[in-house]
Image: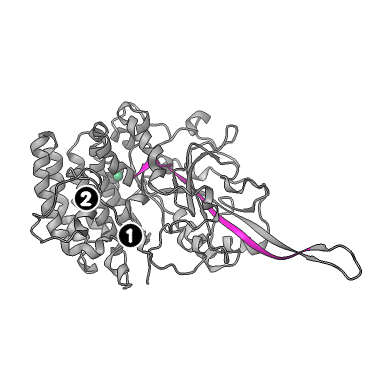
């Protein structure tokens, strides 16, 4: 591994804003070493076919029993950032003495199809490698950045005893070698402080933290709209296919970052096509529910559902309130709706927004009525609530049942950027505003790591980049980050081969 240094060793260990990370090309500095590297063509040919850089994607098979730990040079920092059985996310940093020291998120996916792991020449593997390659080309200040990836596999050798004629003792013969486990890992920047799900919950659990969370949450509409507009650009043309709060992480600077581009789907099931599962359809568009042809406006529907939950929180209700109310049978006049219980609402594995759209208009009316009570009890929130009420019609359009009635991603930013204006801090997102003016997601030659940047100014830090977790007002978010794995069942490293919950399984019928 080598590092083409452009800063001091100590500064490389510090988190920097994602836009600085990209514009300084920090992601290009990580290179795998050659230890235990796989050399067989069966394994390497698909990597070449996918056009993955072998300096960035290493294939090896494990040589020790420490199979379940992040591989060298990555050293786990703290508890797992997330664990859903077949997928685990670690925060890692290469150890002291290594040239590359930036903290990263390491997502490790284990193929859980025991009888049919992907193997070197499977279609599931080549599809996953192509998706890694696609992800490696994305460069946006609100989309997670690829740094490196690896595959690790182990071969199981079954031994049988045979007693040769005339011999008293049996001898063991090794037969039937097969791939027992196959793991795909992707190192990304930035590591998450928490995800949007936790972030929204925090508003209700810690009123003091809400003082700064609410202004930040205001800015996420515009930033996420720009991230999805980037994906849908003619030159990029990627559908995310699984936009939901769990797949939006908040970094140390309080910036929202879209992550998880569906690259685990083929790999973890070992299958070429992955159908829907009831658990994963909450944010799915009506086309997915009915297995109709989908296009990029499927993402718009899912983003609309996320925006609805964000708006619900900003209007003073718990994030689960939308689900609780939309799922309920109601008389349509809104009077049967109870006010917030403060519990976050009941959560049902069967709930999905697509099946509840007939209740959506009544819900939006109710949300507006309840927000009057919030203003009456806390007049300081009136500017925020007024601004959020103004975006409800746009969210309604994003959640149109008919695909053709939904807006395109490039239309969204102007509808939501005025939310930046409600609070002085953090204020407008300079990256997204610059993208709006210039059309470039990452301005070239803008900054070097450690210099002042628009992103740093945005967070109100005086004179440079201060991660939020180090600021006095954000103490509770460190706890929120630590609490994040609790939102999903912990099933041990790599799931231990156990049948964990299906992580994601959105249908893609076209
Ligand atoms: Zn932004």
Residue displayed at 22% across by 57% down: 411
Quadrant of the snapshot with the N terminus: top right
The vertical placement of 76 against 358, above or below, is: above
Q: Is residue 438 visible to us here?
A: no
Q: Which residue is mark 1?
A: 232
> Quarter of the image containing the C terminus?
bottom left
In the picture of the structure, the residue carrying the numbered disc 2 is: 321
Q: Is residue 252 above or below residue 436?
A: above
Is residue 416 shown left or right of residue 201? left
Tell me where residue 238 sits by quadrant.
Answer: bottom left
Horizontal side, residue 350 vs residue 103: left or right: left
- Asked which secondary structure carries label 2, the reply is helix
Q: Position of residue 492 (x, y in %)?
A: 51, 47
Q: Is residue 406 above or below residue 391?
A: below
Out of 470 and 54, give the one closest to the viewer.
470
For the residues carrying marks 1 and 2, which lies nearer the camera in this image? 2
Is residue 83 visible to the viewer in this orientation of the structure? yes
Q: Nearer the viewer, residue 190 or 107?
A: 107
Q: Is residue 179 magenta?
A: yes
Q: Residue at x 54, y 57 (%)?
A: 52
In the picture provided, is 31 more to the left or to the right than 14?
Answer: right
Magenta stretch bounds: 173-196
Q: Position of residue 72 (x, y in %)?
A: 60, 43
Q: Residue 276's spot in the image, x, y percent?
A: 38, 66
Q: How far across and how far down the image is residue 429, in percent?
A: 27, 41
The answer to whether 143 is drawn above or below residue 452 in the figure is below
Dominant SS in magenta: strand
Number of marks present in the image shown: 2
């Amino acid at each position: 591994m080598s590092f083409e240094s452009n800063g001091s060793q100590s500064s490389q260990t510090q988190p920097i804003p994602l836009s600085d990370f990209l514009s300084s090309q920090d992601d290009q500095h990580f290179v795998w070493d050659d230890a235990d590297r796989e050399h067989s063509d069966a394994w390497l040919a698909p990597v070449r076919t996918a056009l993955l850089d072998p300096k960035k994607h290493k294939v090896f098979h494990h040589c020790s029993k420490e199979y379940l730990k992040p591989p060298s040079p990555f050293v786990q920092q703290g508890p797992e950032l997330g664990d859903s059985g077949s997928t685990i996310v670690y925060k890692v940093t290469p150890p002291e003495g290594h040239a590359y020291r930036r903290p990263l998120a390491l997502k490790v996916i284990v193929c859980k199809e025991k009888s049919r792991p992907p193997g070197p020449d499977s279609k599931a593997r080549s599809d996953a490698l192509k998706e890694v390659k696609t992800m490696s080309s994305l460069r946006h200040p609100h989309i997670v950045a690829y740094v490196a990836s690896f595959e690790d596999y182990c071969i199981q050798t079954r031994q049988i005893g045979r007693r040769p004629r005339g011999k008293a003792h049996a001898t063991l013969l090794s037969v039937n070698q097969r791939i027992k486990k196959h793991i795909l890992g992707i190192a990304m920047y930035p590591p998450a402080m928490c995800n949007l799900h936790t972030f929204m919950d925090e508003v209700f659990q810690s009123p003091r933290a809400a003082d700064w969370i609410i202004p930040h949450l205001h800015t996420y509409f515009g930033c996420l709209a720009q991230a999805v507009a980037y994906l849908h650009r003619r030159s990029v043309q990627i559908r995310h296919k699984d936009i939901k709060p769990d797949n939006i992480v908040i970094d140390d600077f309080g910036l929202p970052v879209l992550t998880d581009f569906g690259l685990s789907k083929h790999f973890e099931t070992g299958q070429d096509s992955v159908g829907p599962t009831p658990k994963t359809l909450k944010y799915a568009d009506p086309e997915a529910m009915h297995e109709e042809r989908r296009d990029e406006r499927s993402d718009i529907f899912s983003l609309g559902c996320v925006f609805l939950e964000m708006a619900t929180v900003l209007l003073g209700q718990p994030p689960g309130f939308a689900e609780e109310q939309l799922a309920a049978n109601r008389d349509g006049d809104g009077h049967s709706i109870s006010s917030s219980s403060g519990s976050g609402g009941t959560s049902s594995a069967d709930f999905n927004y697509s099946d509840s759209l007939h209740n959506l208009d009544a819900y939006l009316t109710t949300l507006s009525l309840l927000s009057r009570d919030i203003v009456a009890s806390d007049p300081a929130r009136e500017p925020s609530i007024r601004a959020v009420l103004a975006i409800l019609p746009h969210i309604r359009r994003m959640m149109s049942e008919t695909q053709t009635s939904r807006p395109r991603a490039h239309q969204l930013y102007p509808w939501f950027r005025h939310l930046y204006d409600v609070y002085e801090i953090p204020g407008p997102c300079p990256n997204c505003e610059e993208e709006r003016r210039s059309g470039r997601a990452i301005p070239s030659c803008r900054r070097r790591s450690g210099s002042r940047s628009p992103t740093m100014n945005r967070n109100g830090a005086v004179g440079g980049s201060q991660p939020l977790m180090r600021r006095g007002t954000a103490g509770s978010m460190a706890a929120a980050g630590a609490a994040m794995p609790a939102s999903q069942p912990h099933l041990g490293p790599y799931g231990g081969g156990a049948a964990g919950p299906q992580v994601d399984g959105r249908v893609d019928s076209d």
